[in-house]
Image (cartoon, rainbow, N blue to C red):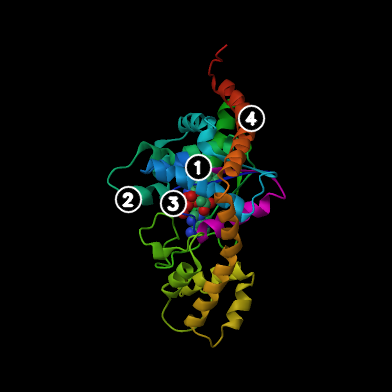
Amino acid sequence: MRVLSGIQPSGHLHLGNYLGALRQFVDLQDRAQCLFCVVDLHALTVRQDPAALRQSTLEVASLYLAAGIDPQRAAIFVQSHVPEHAELGWLLGCLCTFGELQRMTQFKDKAGERESVSLGLFAYPALMAADILLYRASHVPVGDDQRQHLELTRDLAARFNARHGETFPVPAALIGAVGARVMSLQNPHEKMSKSSPDPRSRVELLDTPDQVRAKIRVAVTDSEREIRHDPEHKPAVSNLLEILALASSQSLAELQEHYVGLGYGRLKQDLAEAVVALLEPLQARQRELSAAPDHLRAVLGQGAELAHALAEDTMRDVRTAMGLLTAR
Ligand code: ATP
Ligand code: LTN
């Protein structure tokens, strides 16, 4: 089993990134060869401030470590440190059709919000497929929103193999049963996202305990007072229950029973304290790491070296298979 996944340094990480992705990364490192990448080239598909992007890249890397990824067991690296990502992204872009990219819902959502749309934003899924196939990954842990991109990656792998000979395994998505789609605290019909303009919509992993409490206190709820898990009729309360289930390691059934006769205020108080407790050890480790930037740089250097060796190997096969002439 070889695992690859990535998170964009496009802002501050939030509970959705943790529960949908990062938490799974930590569990997988004992069972598989793992590569976790900070996908800075993907962040550039929308406009970024250069200094903020550099800062955010280091912050995401430090949160990988703070969450419990062990650099002795898993490679942690920055996408742009391995230039083969961009090269394979181009080659896969030549296999991928305009129609396929036009059907991507993430593209439609993100393009709809802005007046100017970059070629990079359109080609984003081809680069993501390259991230995965470059390491011949077999499994990709992601949140539910990435399902469609993974399907396209699988199609591209199969298409490449059919046209150019068996080169890539067809990778499988690993999507958790709970936590794969954490919703906004302000609109339970939208996913929690780094780029939402309303900071109250998300709990960030580096929020202070008081910020966490305040955001949960003003989270929207549903009509009627009953606390039950019913995403269709009670989307907001169901979202709070799911987050609480994960943060406190209790089942939804246990929680539902516990809250019979209790009100939303109580649920929110308990949730706030559970989230504060979940984040506290992670924040303590992150503070230590940010005080030792050389250590983080060394981890990223070592990760890039390992990743680069694997990437070079794949690219030799890919260039030959596609008919590119070797330089000598
Ligand atoms: P942006 O808002 O800038 O698009 P994002 O918050 O969606 O960013 P990504 O970097 O695109 O974050 O995603 C990193 C990982 O976190 C992916 O595996 C993605 O599926 C997962 N993820 C993102 N948001 C959520 C969410 N609300 N619930 C569960 N998983 C999520
Ligand atoms: N598209 C992903 C981020 C991402 C990714 C990857 C995830 C880029 N490359 C490779 C898994 C594997 C997102 O979360 N928006």
From the image, tell me which residue sits under label 2. 112
Mark 3 or 1: the one toward you: 3
90 in relation to 11, above or below: above
Residue located beneath label 4 in the image: 309
Disc 3 target residue: 11
The mark nearer the N terminus, 3 or 2, is 3
Closer to us: 55 or 93: 55
Q: Residues within 10 Å of mark 2 (few under 14, many from 20)?
A: few
Residue 151, above or below 206: above
| Residue span colored magenta | 15-38
Q: Residue at x 56, y 83 (%)?
A: 259
Q: Does dot 3 land on a helix, a strand or a loop?
A: loop
**Crowdedness near tag 1: few (<14), some (14–19) or many (≥20) residues, C-alpha within 10 Å:** many
Q: Distance of mark 2 from mark 4, alpha carbons?
A: 39 Å
Amino acid type indicated by mark 3: Gly
- Alpha carbon of mark 3 to alpha carbon of mark 4: how far? 30 Å
> Which residue in the protein does label 1 denote?
39
Residue at the outermost left position:
115
Give the x, y percent position of residue 202: 44, 63
Q: Identify which residue, 117 or 61, lies in the foreground.
A: 61
